Image (spheres, rainbow, N blue to C red):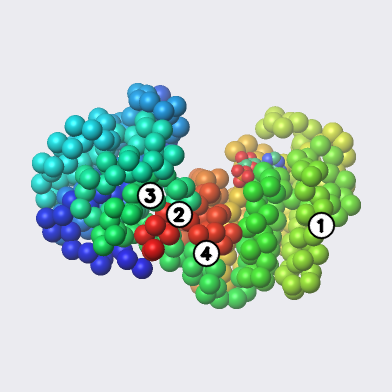
Amino acid sequence: MQTIDNFNFKDKKALIRVDFNVPLDSDYQITDTTRIDATLPTIRKILADGGSVILMSHLGRPKGGPEEKFSLKHLLPYLSEQLKLNVKFADDCIGQSAIELSSTLKPGEVLLLENLRFYKEEEKGDDAFSQKLASLGDIYVNDAFGTAHRAHASTAVIARYFPQARCFGYVMAGEVTHLDKVLKEAVHPFTAILGGAKVSGKIEVITHLMDKVDNLIIGGGMMFTFIKALGGEVGNSLVEEDLLDISRNIVEKAKTMGVSLYLPVDAVIADAFSNDANIKICNAHDIPDPWMGLDIGPNTLHKFEHVIEQSSTILWNGPMGVFEMRNFEEGTKRIAESIAKATDNGAFSLVGGGDSVAAINKYDLAKRISYVSTGGGAMLEYIEGKELPGVKAILD
Ligand code: AMP
């Protein structure tokens, strides 16, 4: 695998695709710096070599032209402070200012380009646009795992302009290495925990994991489609009627493949989708109308924790309940703690997906997880066994 460690960047301009798609509040202050922080080691290594750095990223979902709220200039103070230097800014990612600022960039200096998605050509994977970006640097570095599943101009197409000079940054290399460790070299027993709102979007993930894992734990809103498929009464809980057959097939496939599939036995139910609703604990297969299940129950937790704490490899994606509401966060919180405890005892744990990572951070457990993935959609596609365009473009 070609990484930045295979290159000496002395007197070279590294053009780095980063994922600086960070949340900003109404005063344009960054509310979660995780994605920027993750890329700092890559930037520092190149500067330490005596190279210069040109950073390019998207931010938010602009409609195809400049928008103040999506300008990357809001990131300059934080970035400058972290790197302890004055980061320069090109207010257009291509064109005169980008060309002038990049051509005069000296070793040790950093230039940030304006939001790539101010051009619709970025998401279209436009070749001419890729070429203009490519002309700004000597070595192309992809360090944006969060967009690696997209064949965009800056994430994939651009790589063809650097046939001898393209590589992964530390974030990308870390993601691929750790995901491979789980998917290809897992120490058994291997337990995957899946949650989140829906089964749709996770079917391929479940199917692909089936011949790798020993235990498959299912929680979150998606559990009710499975429970209904098995003949349970789920009241007003979230159900995808069109996936009942598929869910039944998954349960059958687990049996024939010798995978232990764990579904919740009890649930925290509510009479409305609200933190102020009335709540009680109920058998997960016997939920009365119009009540709905919004978290896994105590007996389920007891069982799930036991399985997790016996595991040597753990993969988690998706919350166990509506953890954004205090009354329905217990399941997600205790599963996160259980994974941390198993990790303390020697298991390898990998957690990914926006909500699961938010939960890990909310409960201050990041240091007790082996690897926290920065990619949601990209991670799921990698687990599905798909070749990610951003990864392929570097490897080919
Ligand atoms: P996803 O984006 O599919 O990973 O789903 C994440 C969302 O699933 C979170 O916002 C949770 O609030 C939601 N969720 C988890 N459990 C349930 C549930 N039992 N009913 C409805 N939504 C849920």
Question: Which amino acid type is shown beneath numbered disc 2?
Answer: Pro
Q: Is label 4's Cβ within 8 Å of ligand 1?
A: no
Along the horizontal axis of the image, is 149 left or right of 28? right
Can you say which quadrant of the picture contains the N terminus?
bottom left
Ligand number 1: quarter of image: top right
Q: Mark 3 vs mark 4: give the one in front.
A: 3
Q: Mark 2 vs mark 1: give the one in front.
A: 2
State the residue position of label 1.
248
Q: Earlier in the sequence, mark 3 or mark 4?
A: 3
Q: Residue 289 at x, y = what percent?
A: 87, 36
Badge 1 element? helix
Q: Is residue 114 above or below residue 4?
A: above
Can you say which quadrant of the picture contains the C terminus?
bottom left
State the residue position of label 2.
389
- The CA span between labels 3 and 1 is 41 Å
Which of 195 and 209 lies nearest the eye of the viewer?
A: 209
Badge 2 element? helix
Along the horizontal axis of the image, is 125 left or right of 226? left
Residue 395 numbered tag: none
Instruction: Identify the residue at image location x=52%, y=64%.
Output: 349
Q: Is residue 32 in view?
A: no
Q: Mark 2 vs mark 3: give the one in front.
A: 3
Q: Is label 2's Cβ within 8 Å of ligand 1?
A: no
Instruction: Please tell me how crowded label 1 is: few (under 14), some (14-19), or many (20+) other residues with Cα within 10 Å.
Output: some
Q: Are marks 2 and 3 in contact (CB under 8 Å)?
A: no
Residue 349 numbered tag: 4
Q: Earlier in the sequence, mark 4 or mark 1?
A: 1
State the residue position of label 3.
157
Badge 3 element? helix
